[in-house]
Amino acid sequence: MKFLSGKVAHQLDAKNRIRIPAKYKAAFPKGETLYYVEYAPGCISVMPESVLSRKLGSFDEVNPGDPQLMDAKRRIMSSIEEVAEDSQGRAQLPKSFRDYAGLVKDVVTVGMGDYVEIWAQERFEHSVGSMSIQQANALAYKRNAEQQGS
């Protein structure tokens, strides 16, 4: 799978359908099922099955006798839906996902390495737009240094 990066501004259509931008869609593994996921606050993630399975791996061995972990697993698993595209490459974005991410019309899809995020354009600009690339790099390098020090 190619590394997913960059951003693409586009729109939901009048029937709340979306097209995953071609540059991202082409980078996902051929023939692999894609999923909408409530993964990060404020946006909807789209992940191929292999990436989603890797991220959910920690739930494989959840003890059913641990009600809190079972509830967490239920919450997470119920926040995942398969992306079903029509013959024109459009996919219906379920209302629960639109509500979760505040998606109405104008959206931004952002490459996040091995998956993409779909943001309401205004929410994306508010969340990320005020951070300079220098601030982002400083945070990333600080985190990397802290992890190497542990």
Image: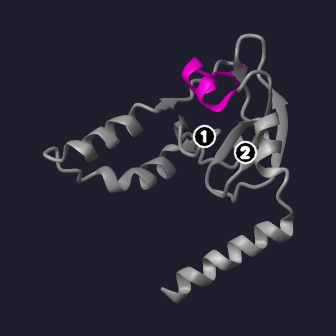
Question: Considering the numbered disc 1 on the image, is that residue within a helix, a strand or a loop?
Answer: strand
Checking the image for residue 24, the label placed there is: 2
Residue 54 left/right relative to 100: left
Quadrant holding the N terminus: bottom right
Mark 1 in CB contact with mark 2 (< 8 angstroms): yes
Q: Is residue 91 magenta?
A: yes
Residue at image coords 61%, 55%: 114
- State which tag comes first along the sequence, 1 or 2: 2
Q: Report the number of discs.
A: 2
Q: Residue at x 67, y 18 (%)?
A: 87
Q: How is the image coloured?
A: one colour
Q: Which mark is residue 46?
A: 1
Question: Quick one: label 2, few (<14), some, or many (20+) residues within 10 Å?
Answer: many
What element does badge 2 sit on?
helix
Image: magenta residue range: 88-102
Locate residue 130, reporting x and y percent.
85, 53
Q: Is residue 74 magenta?
A: no
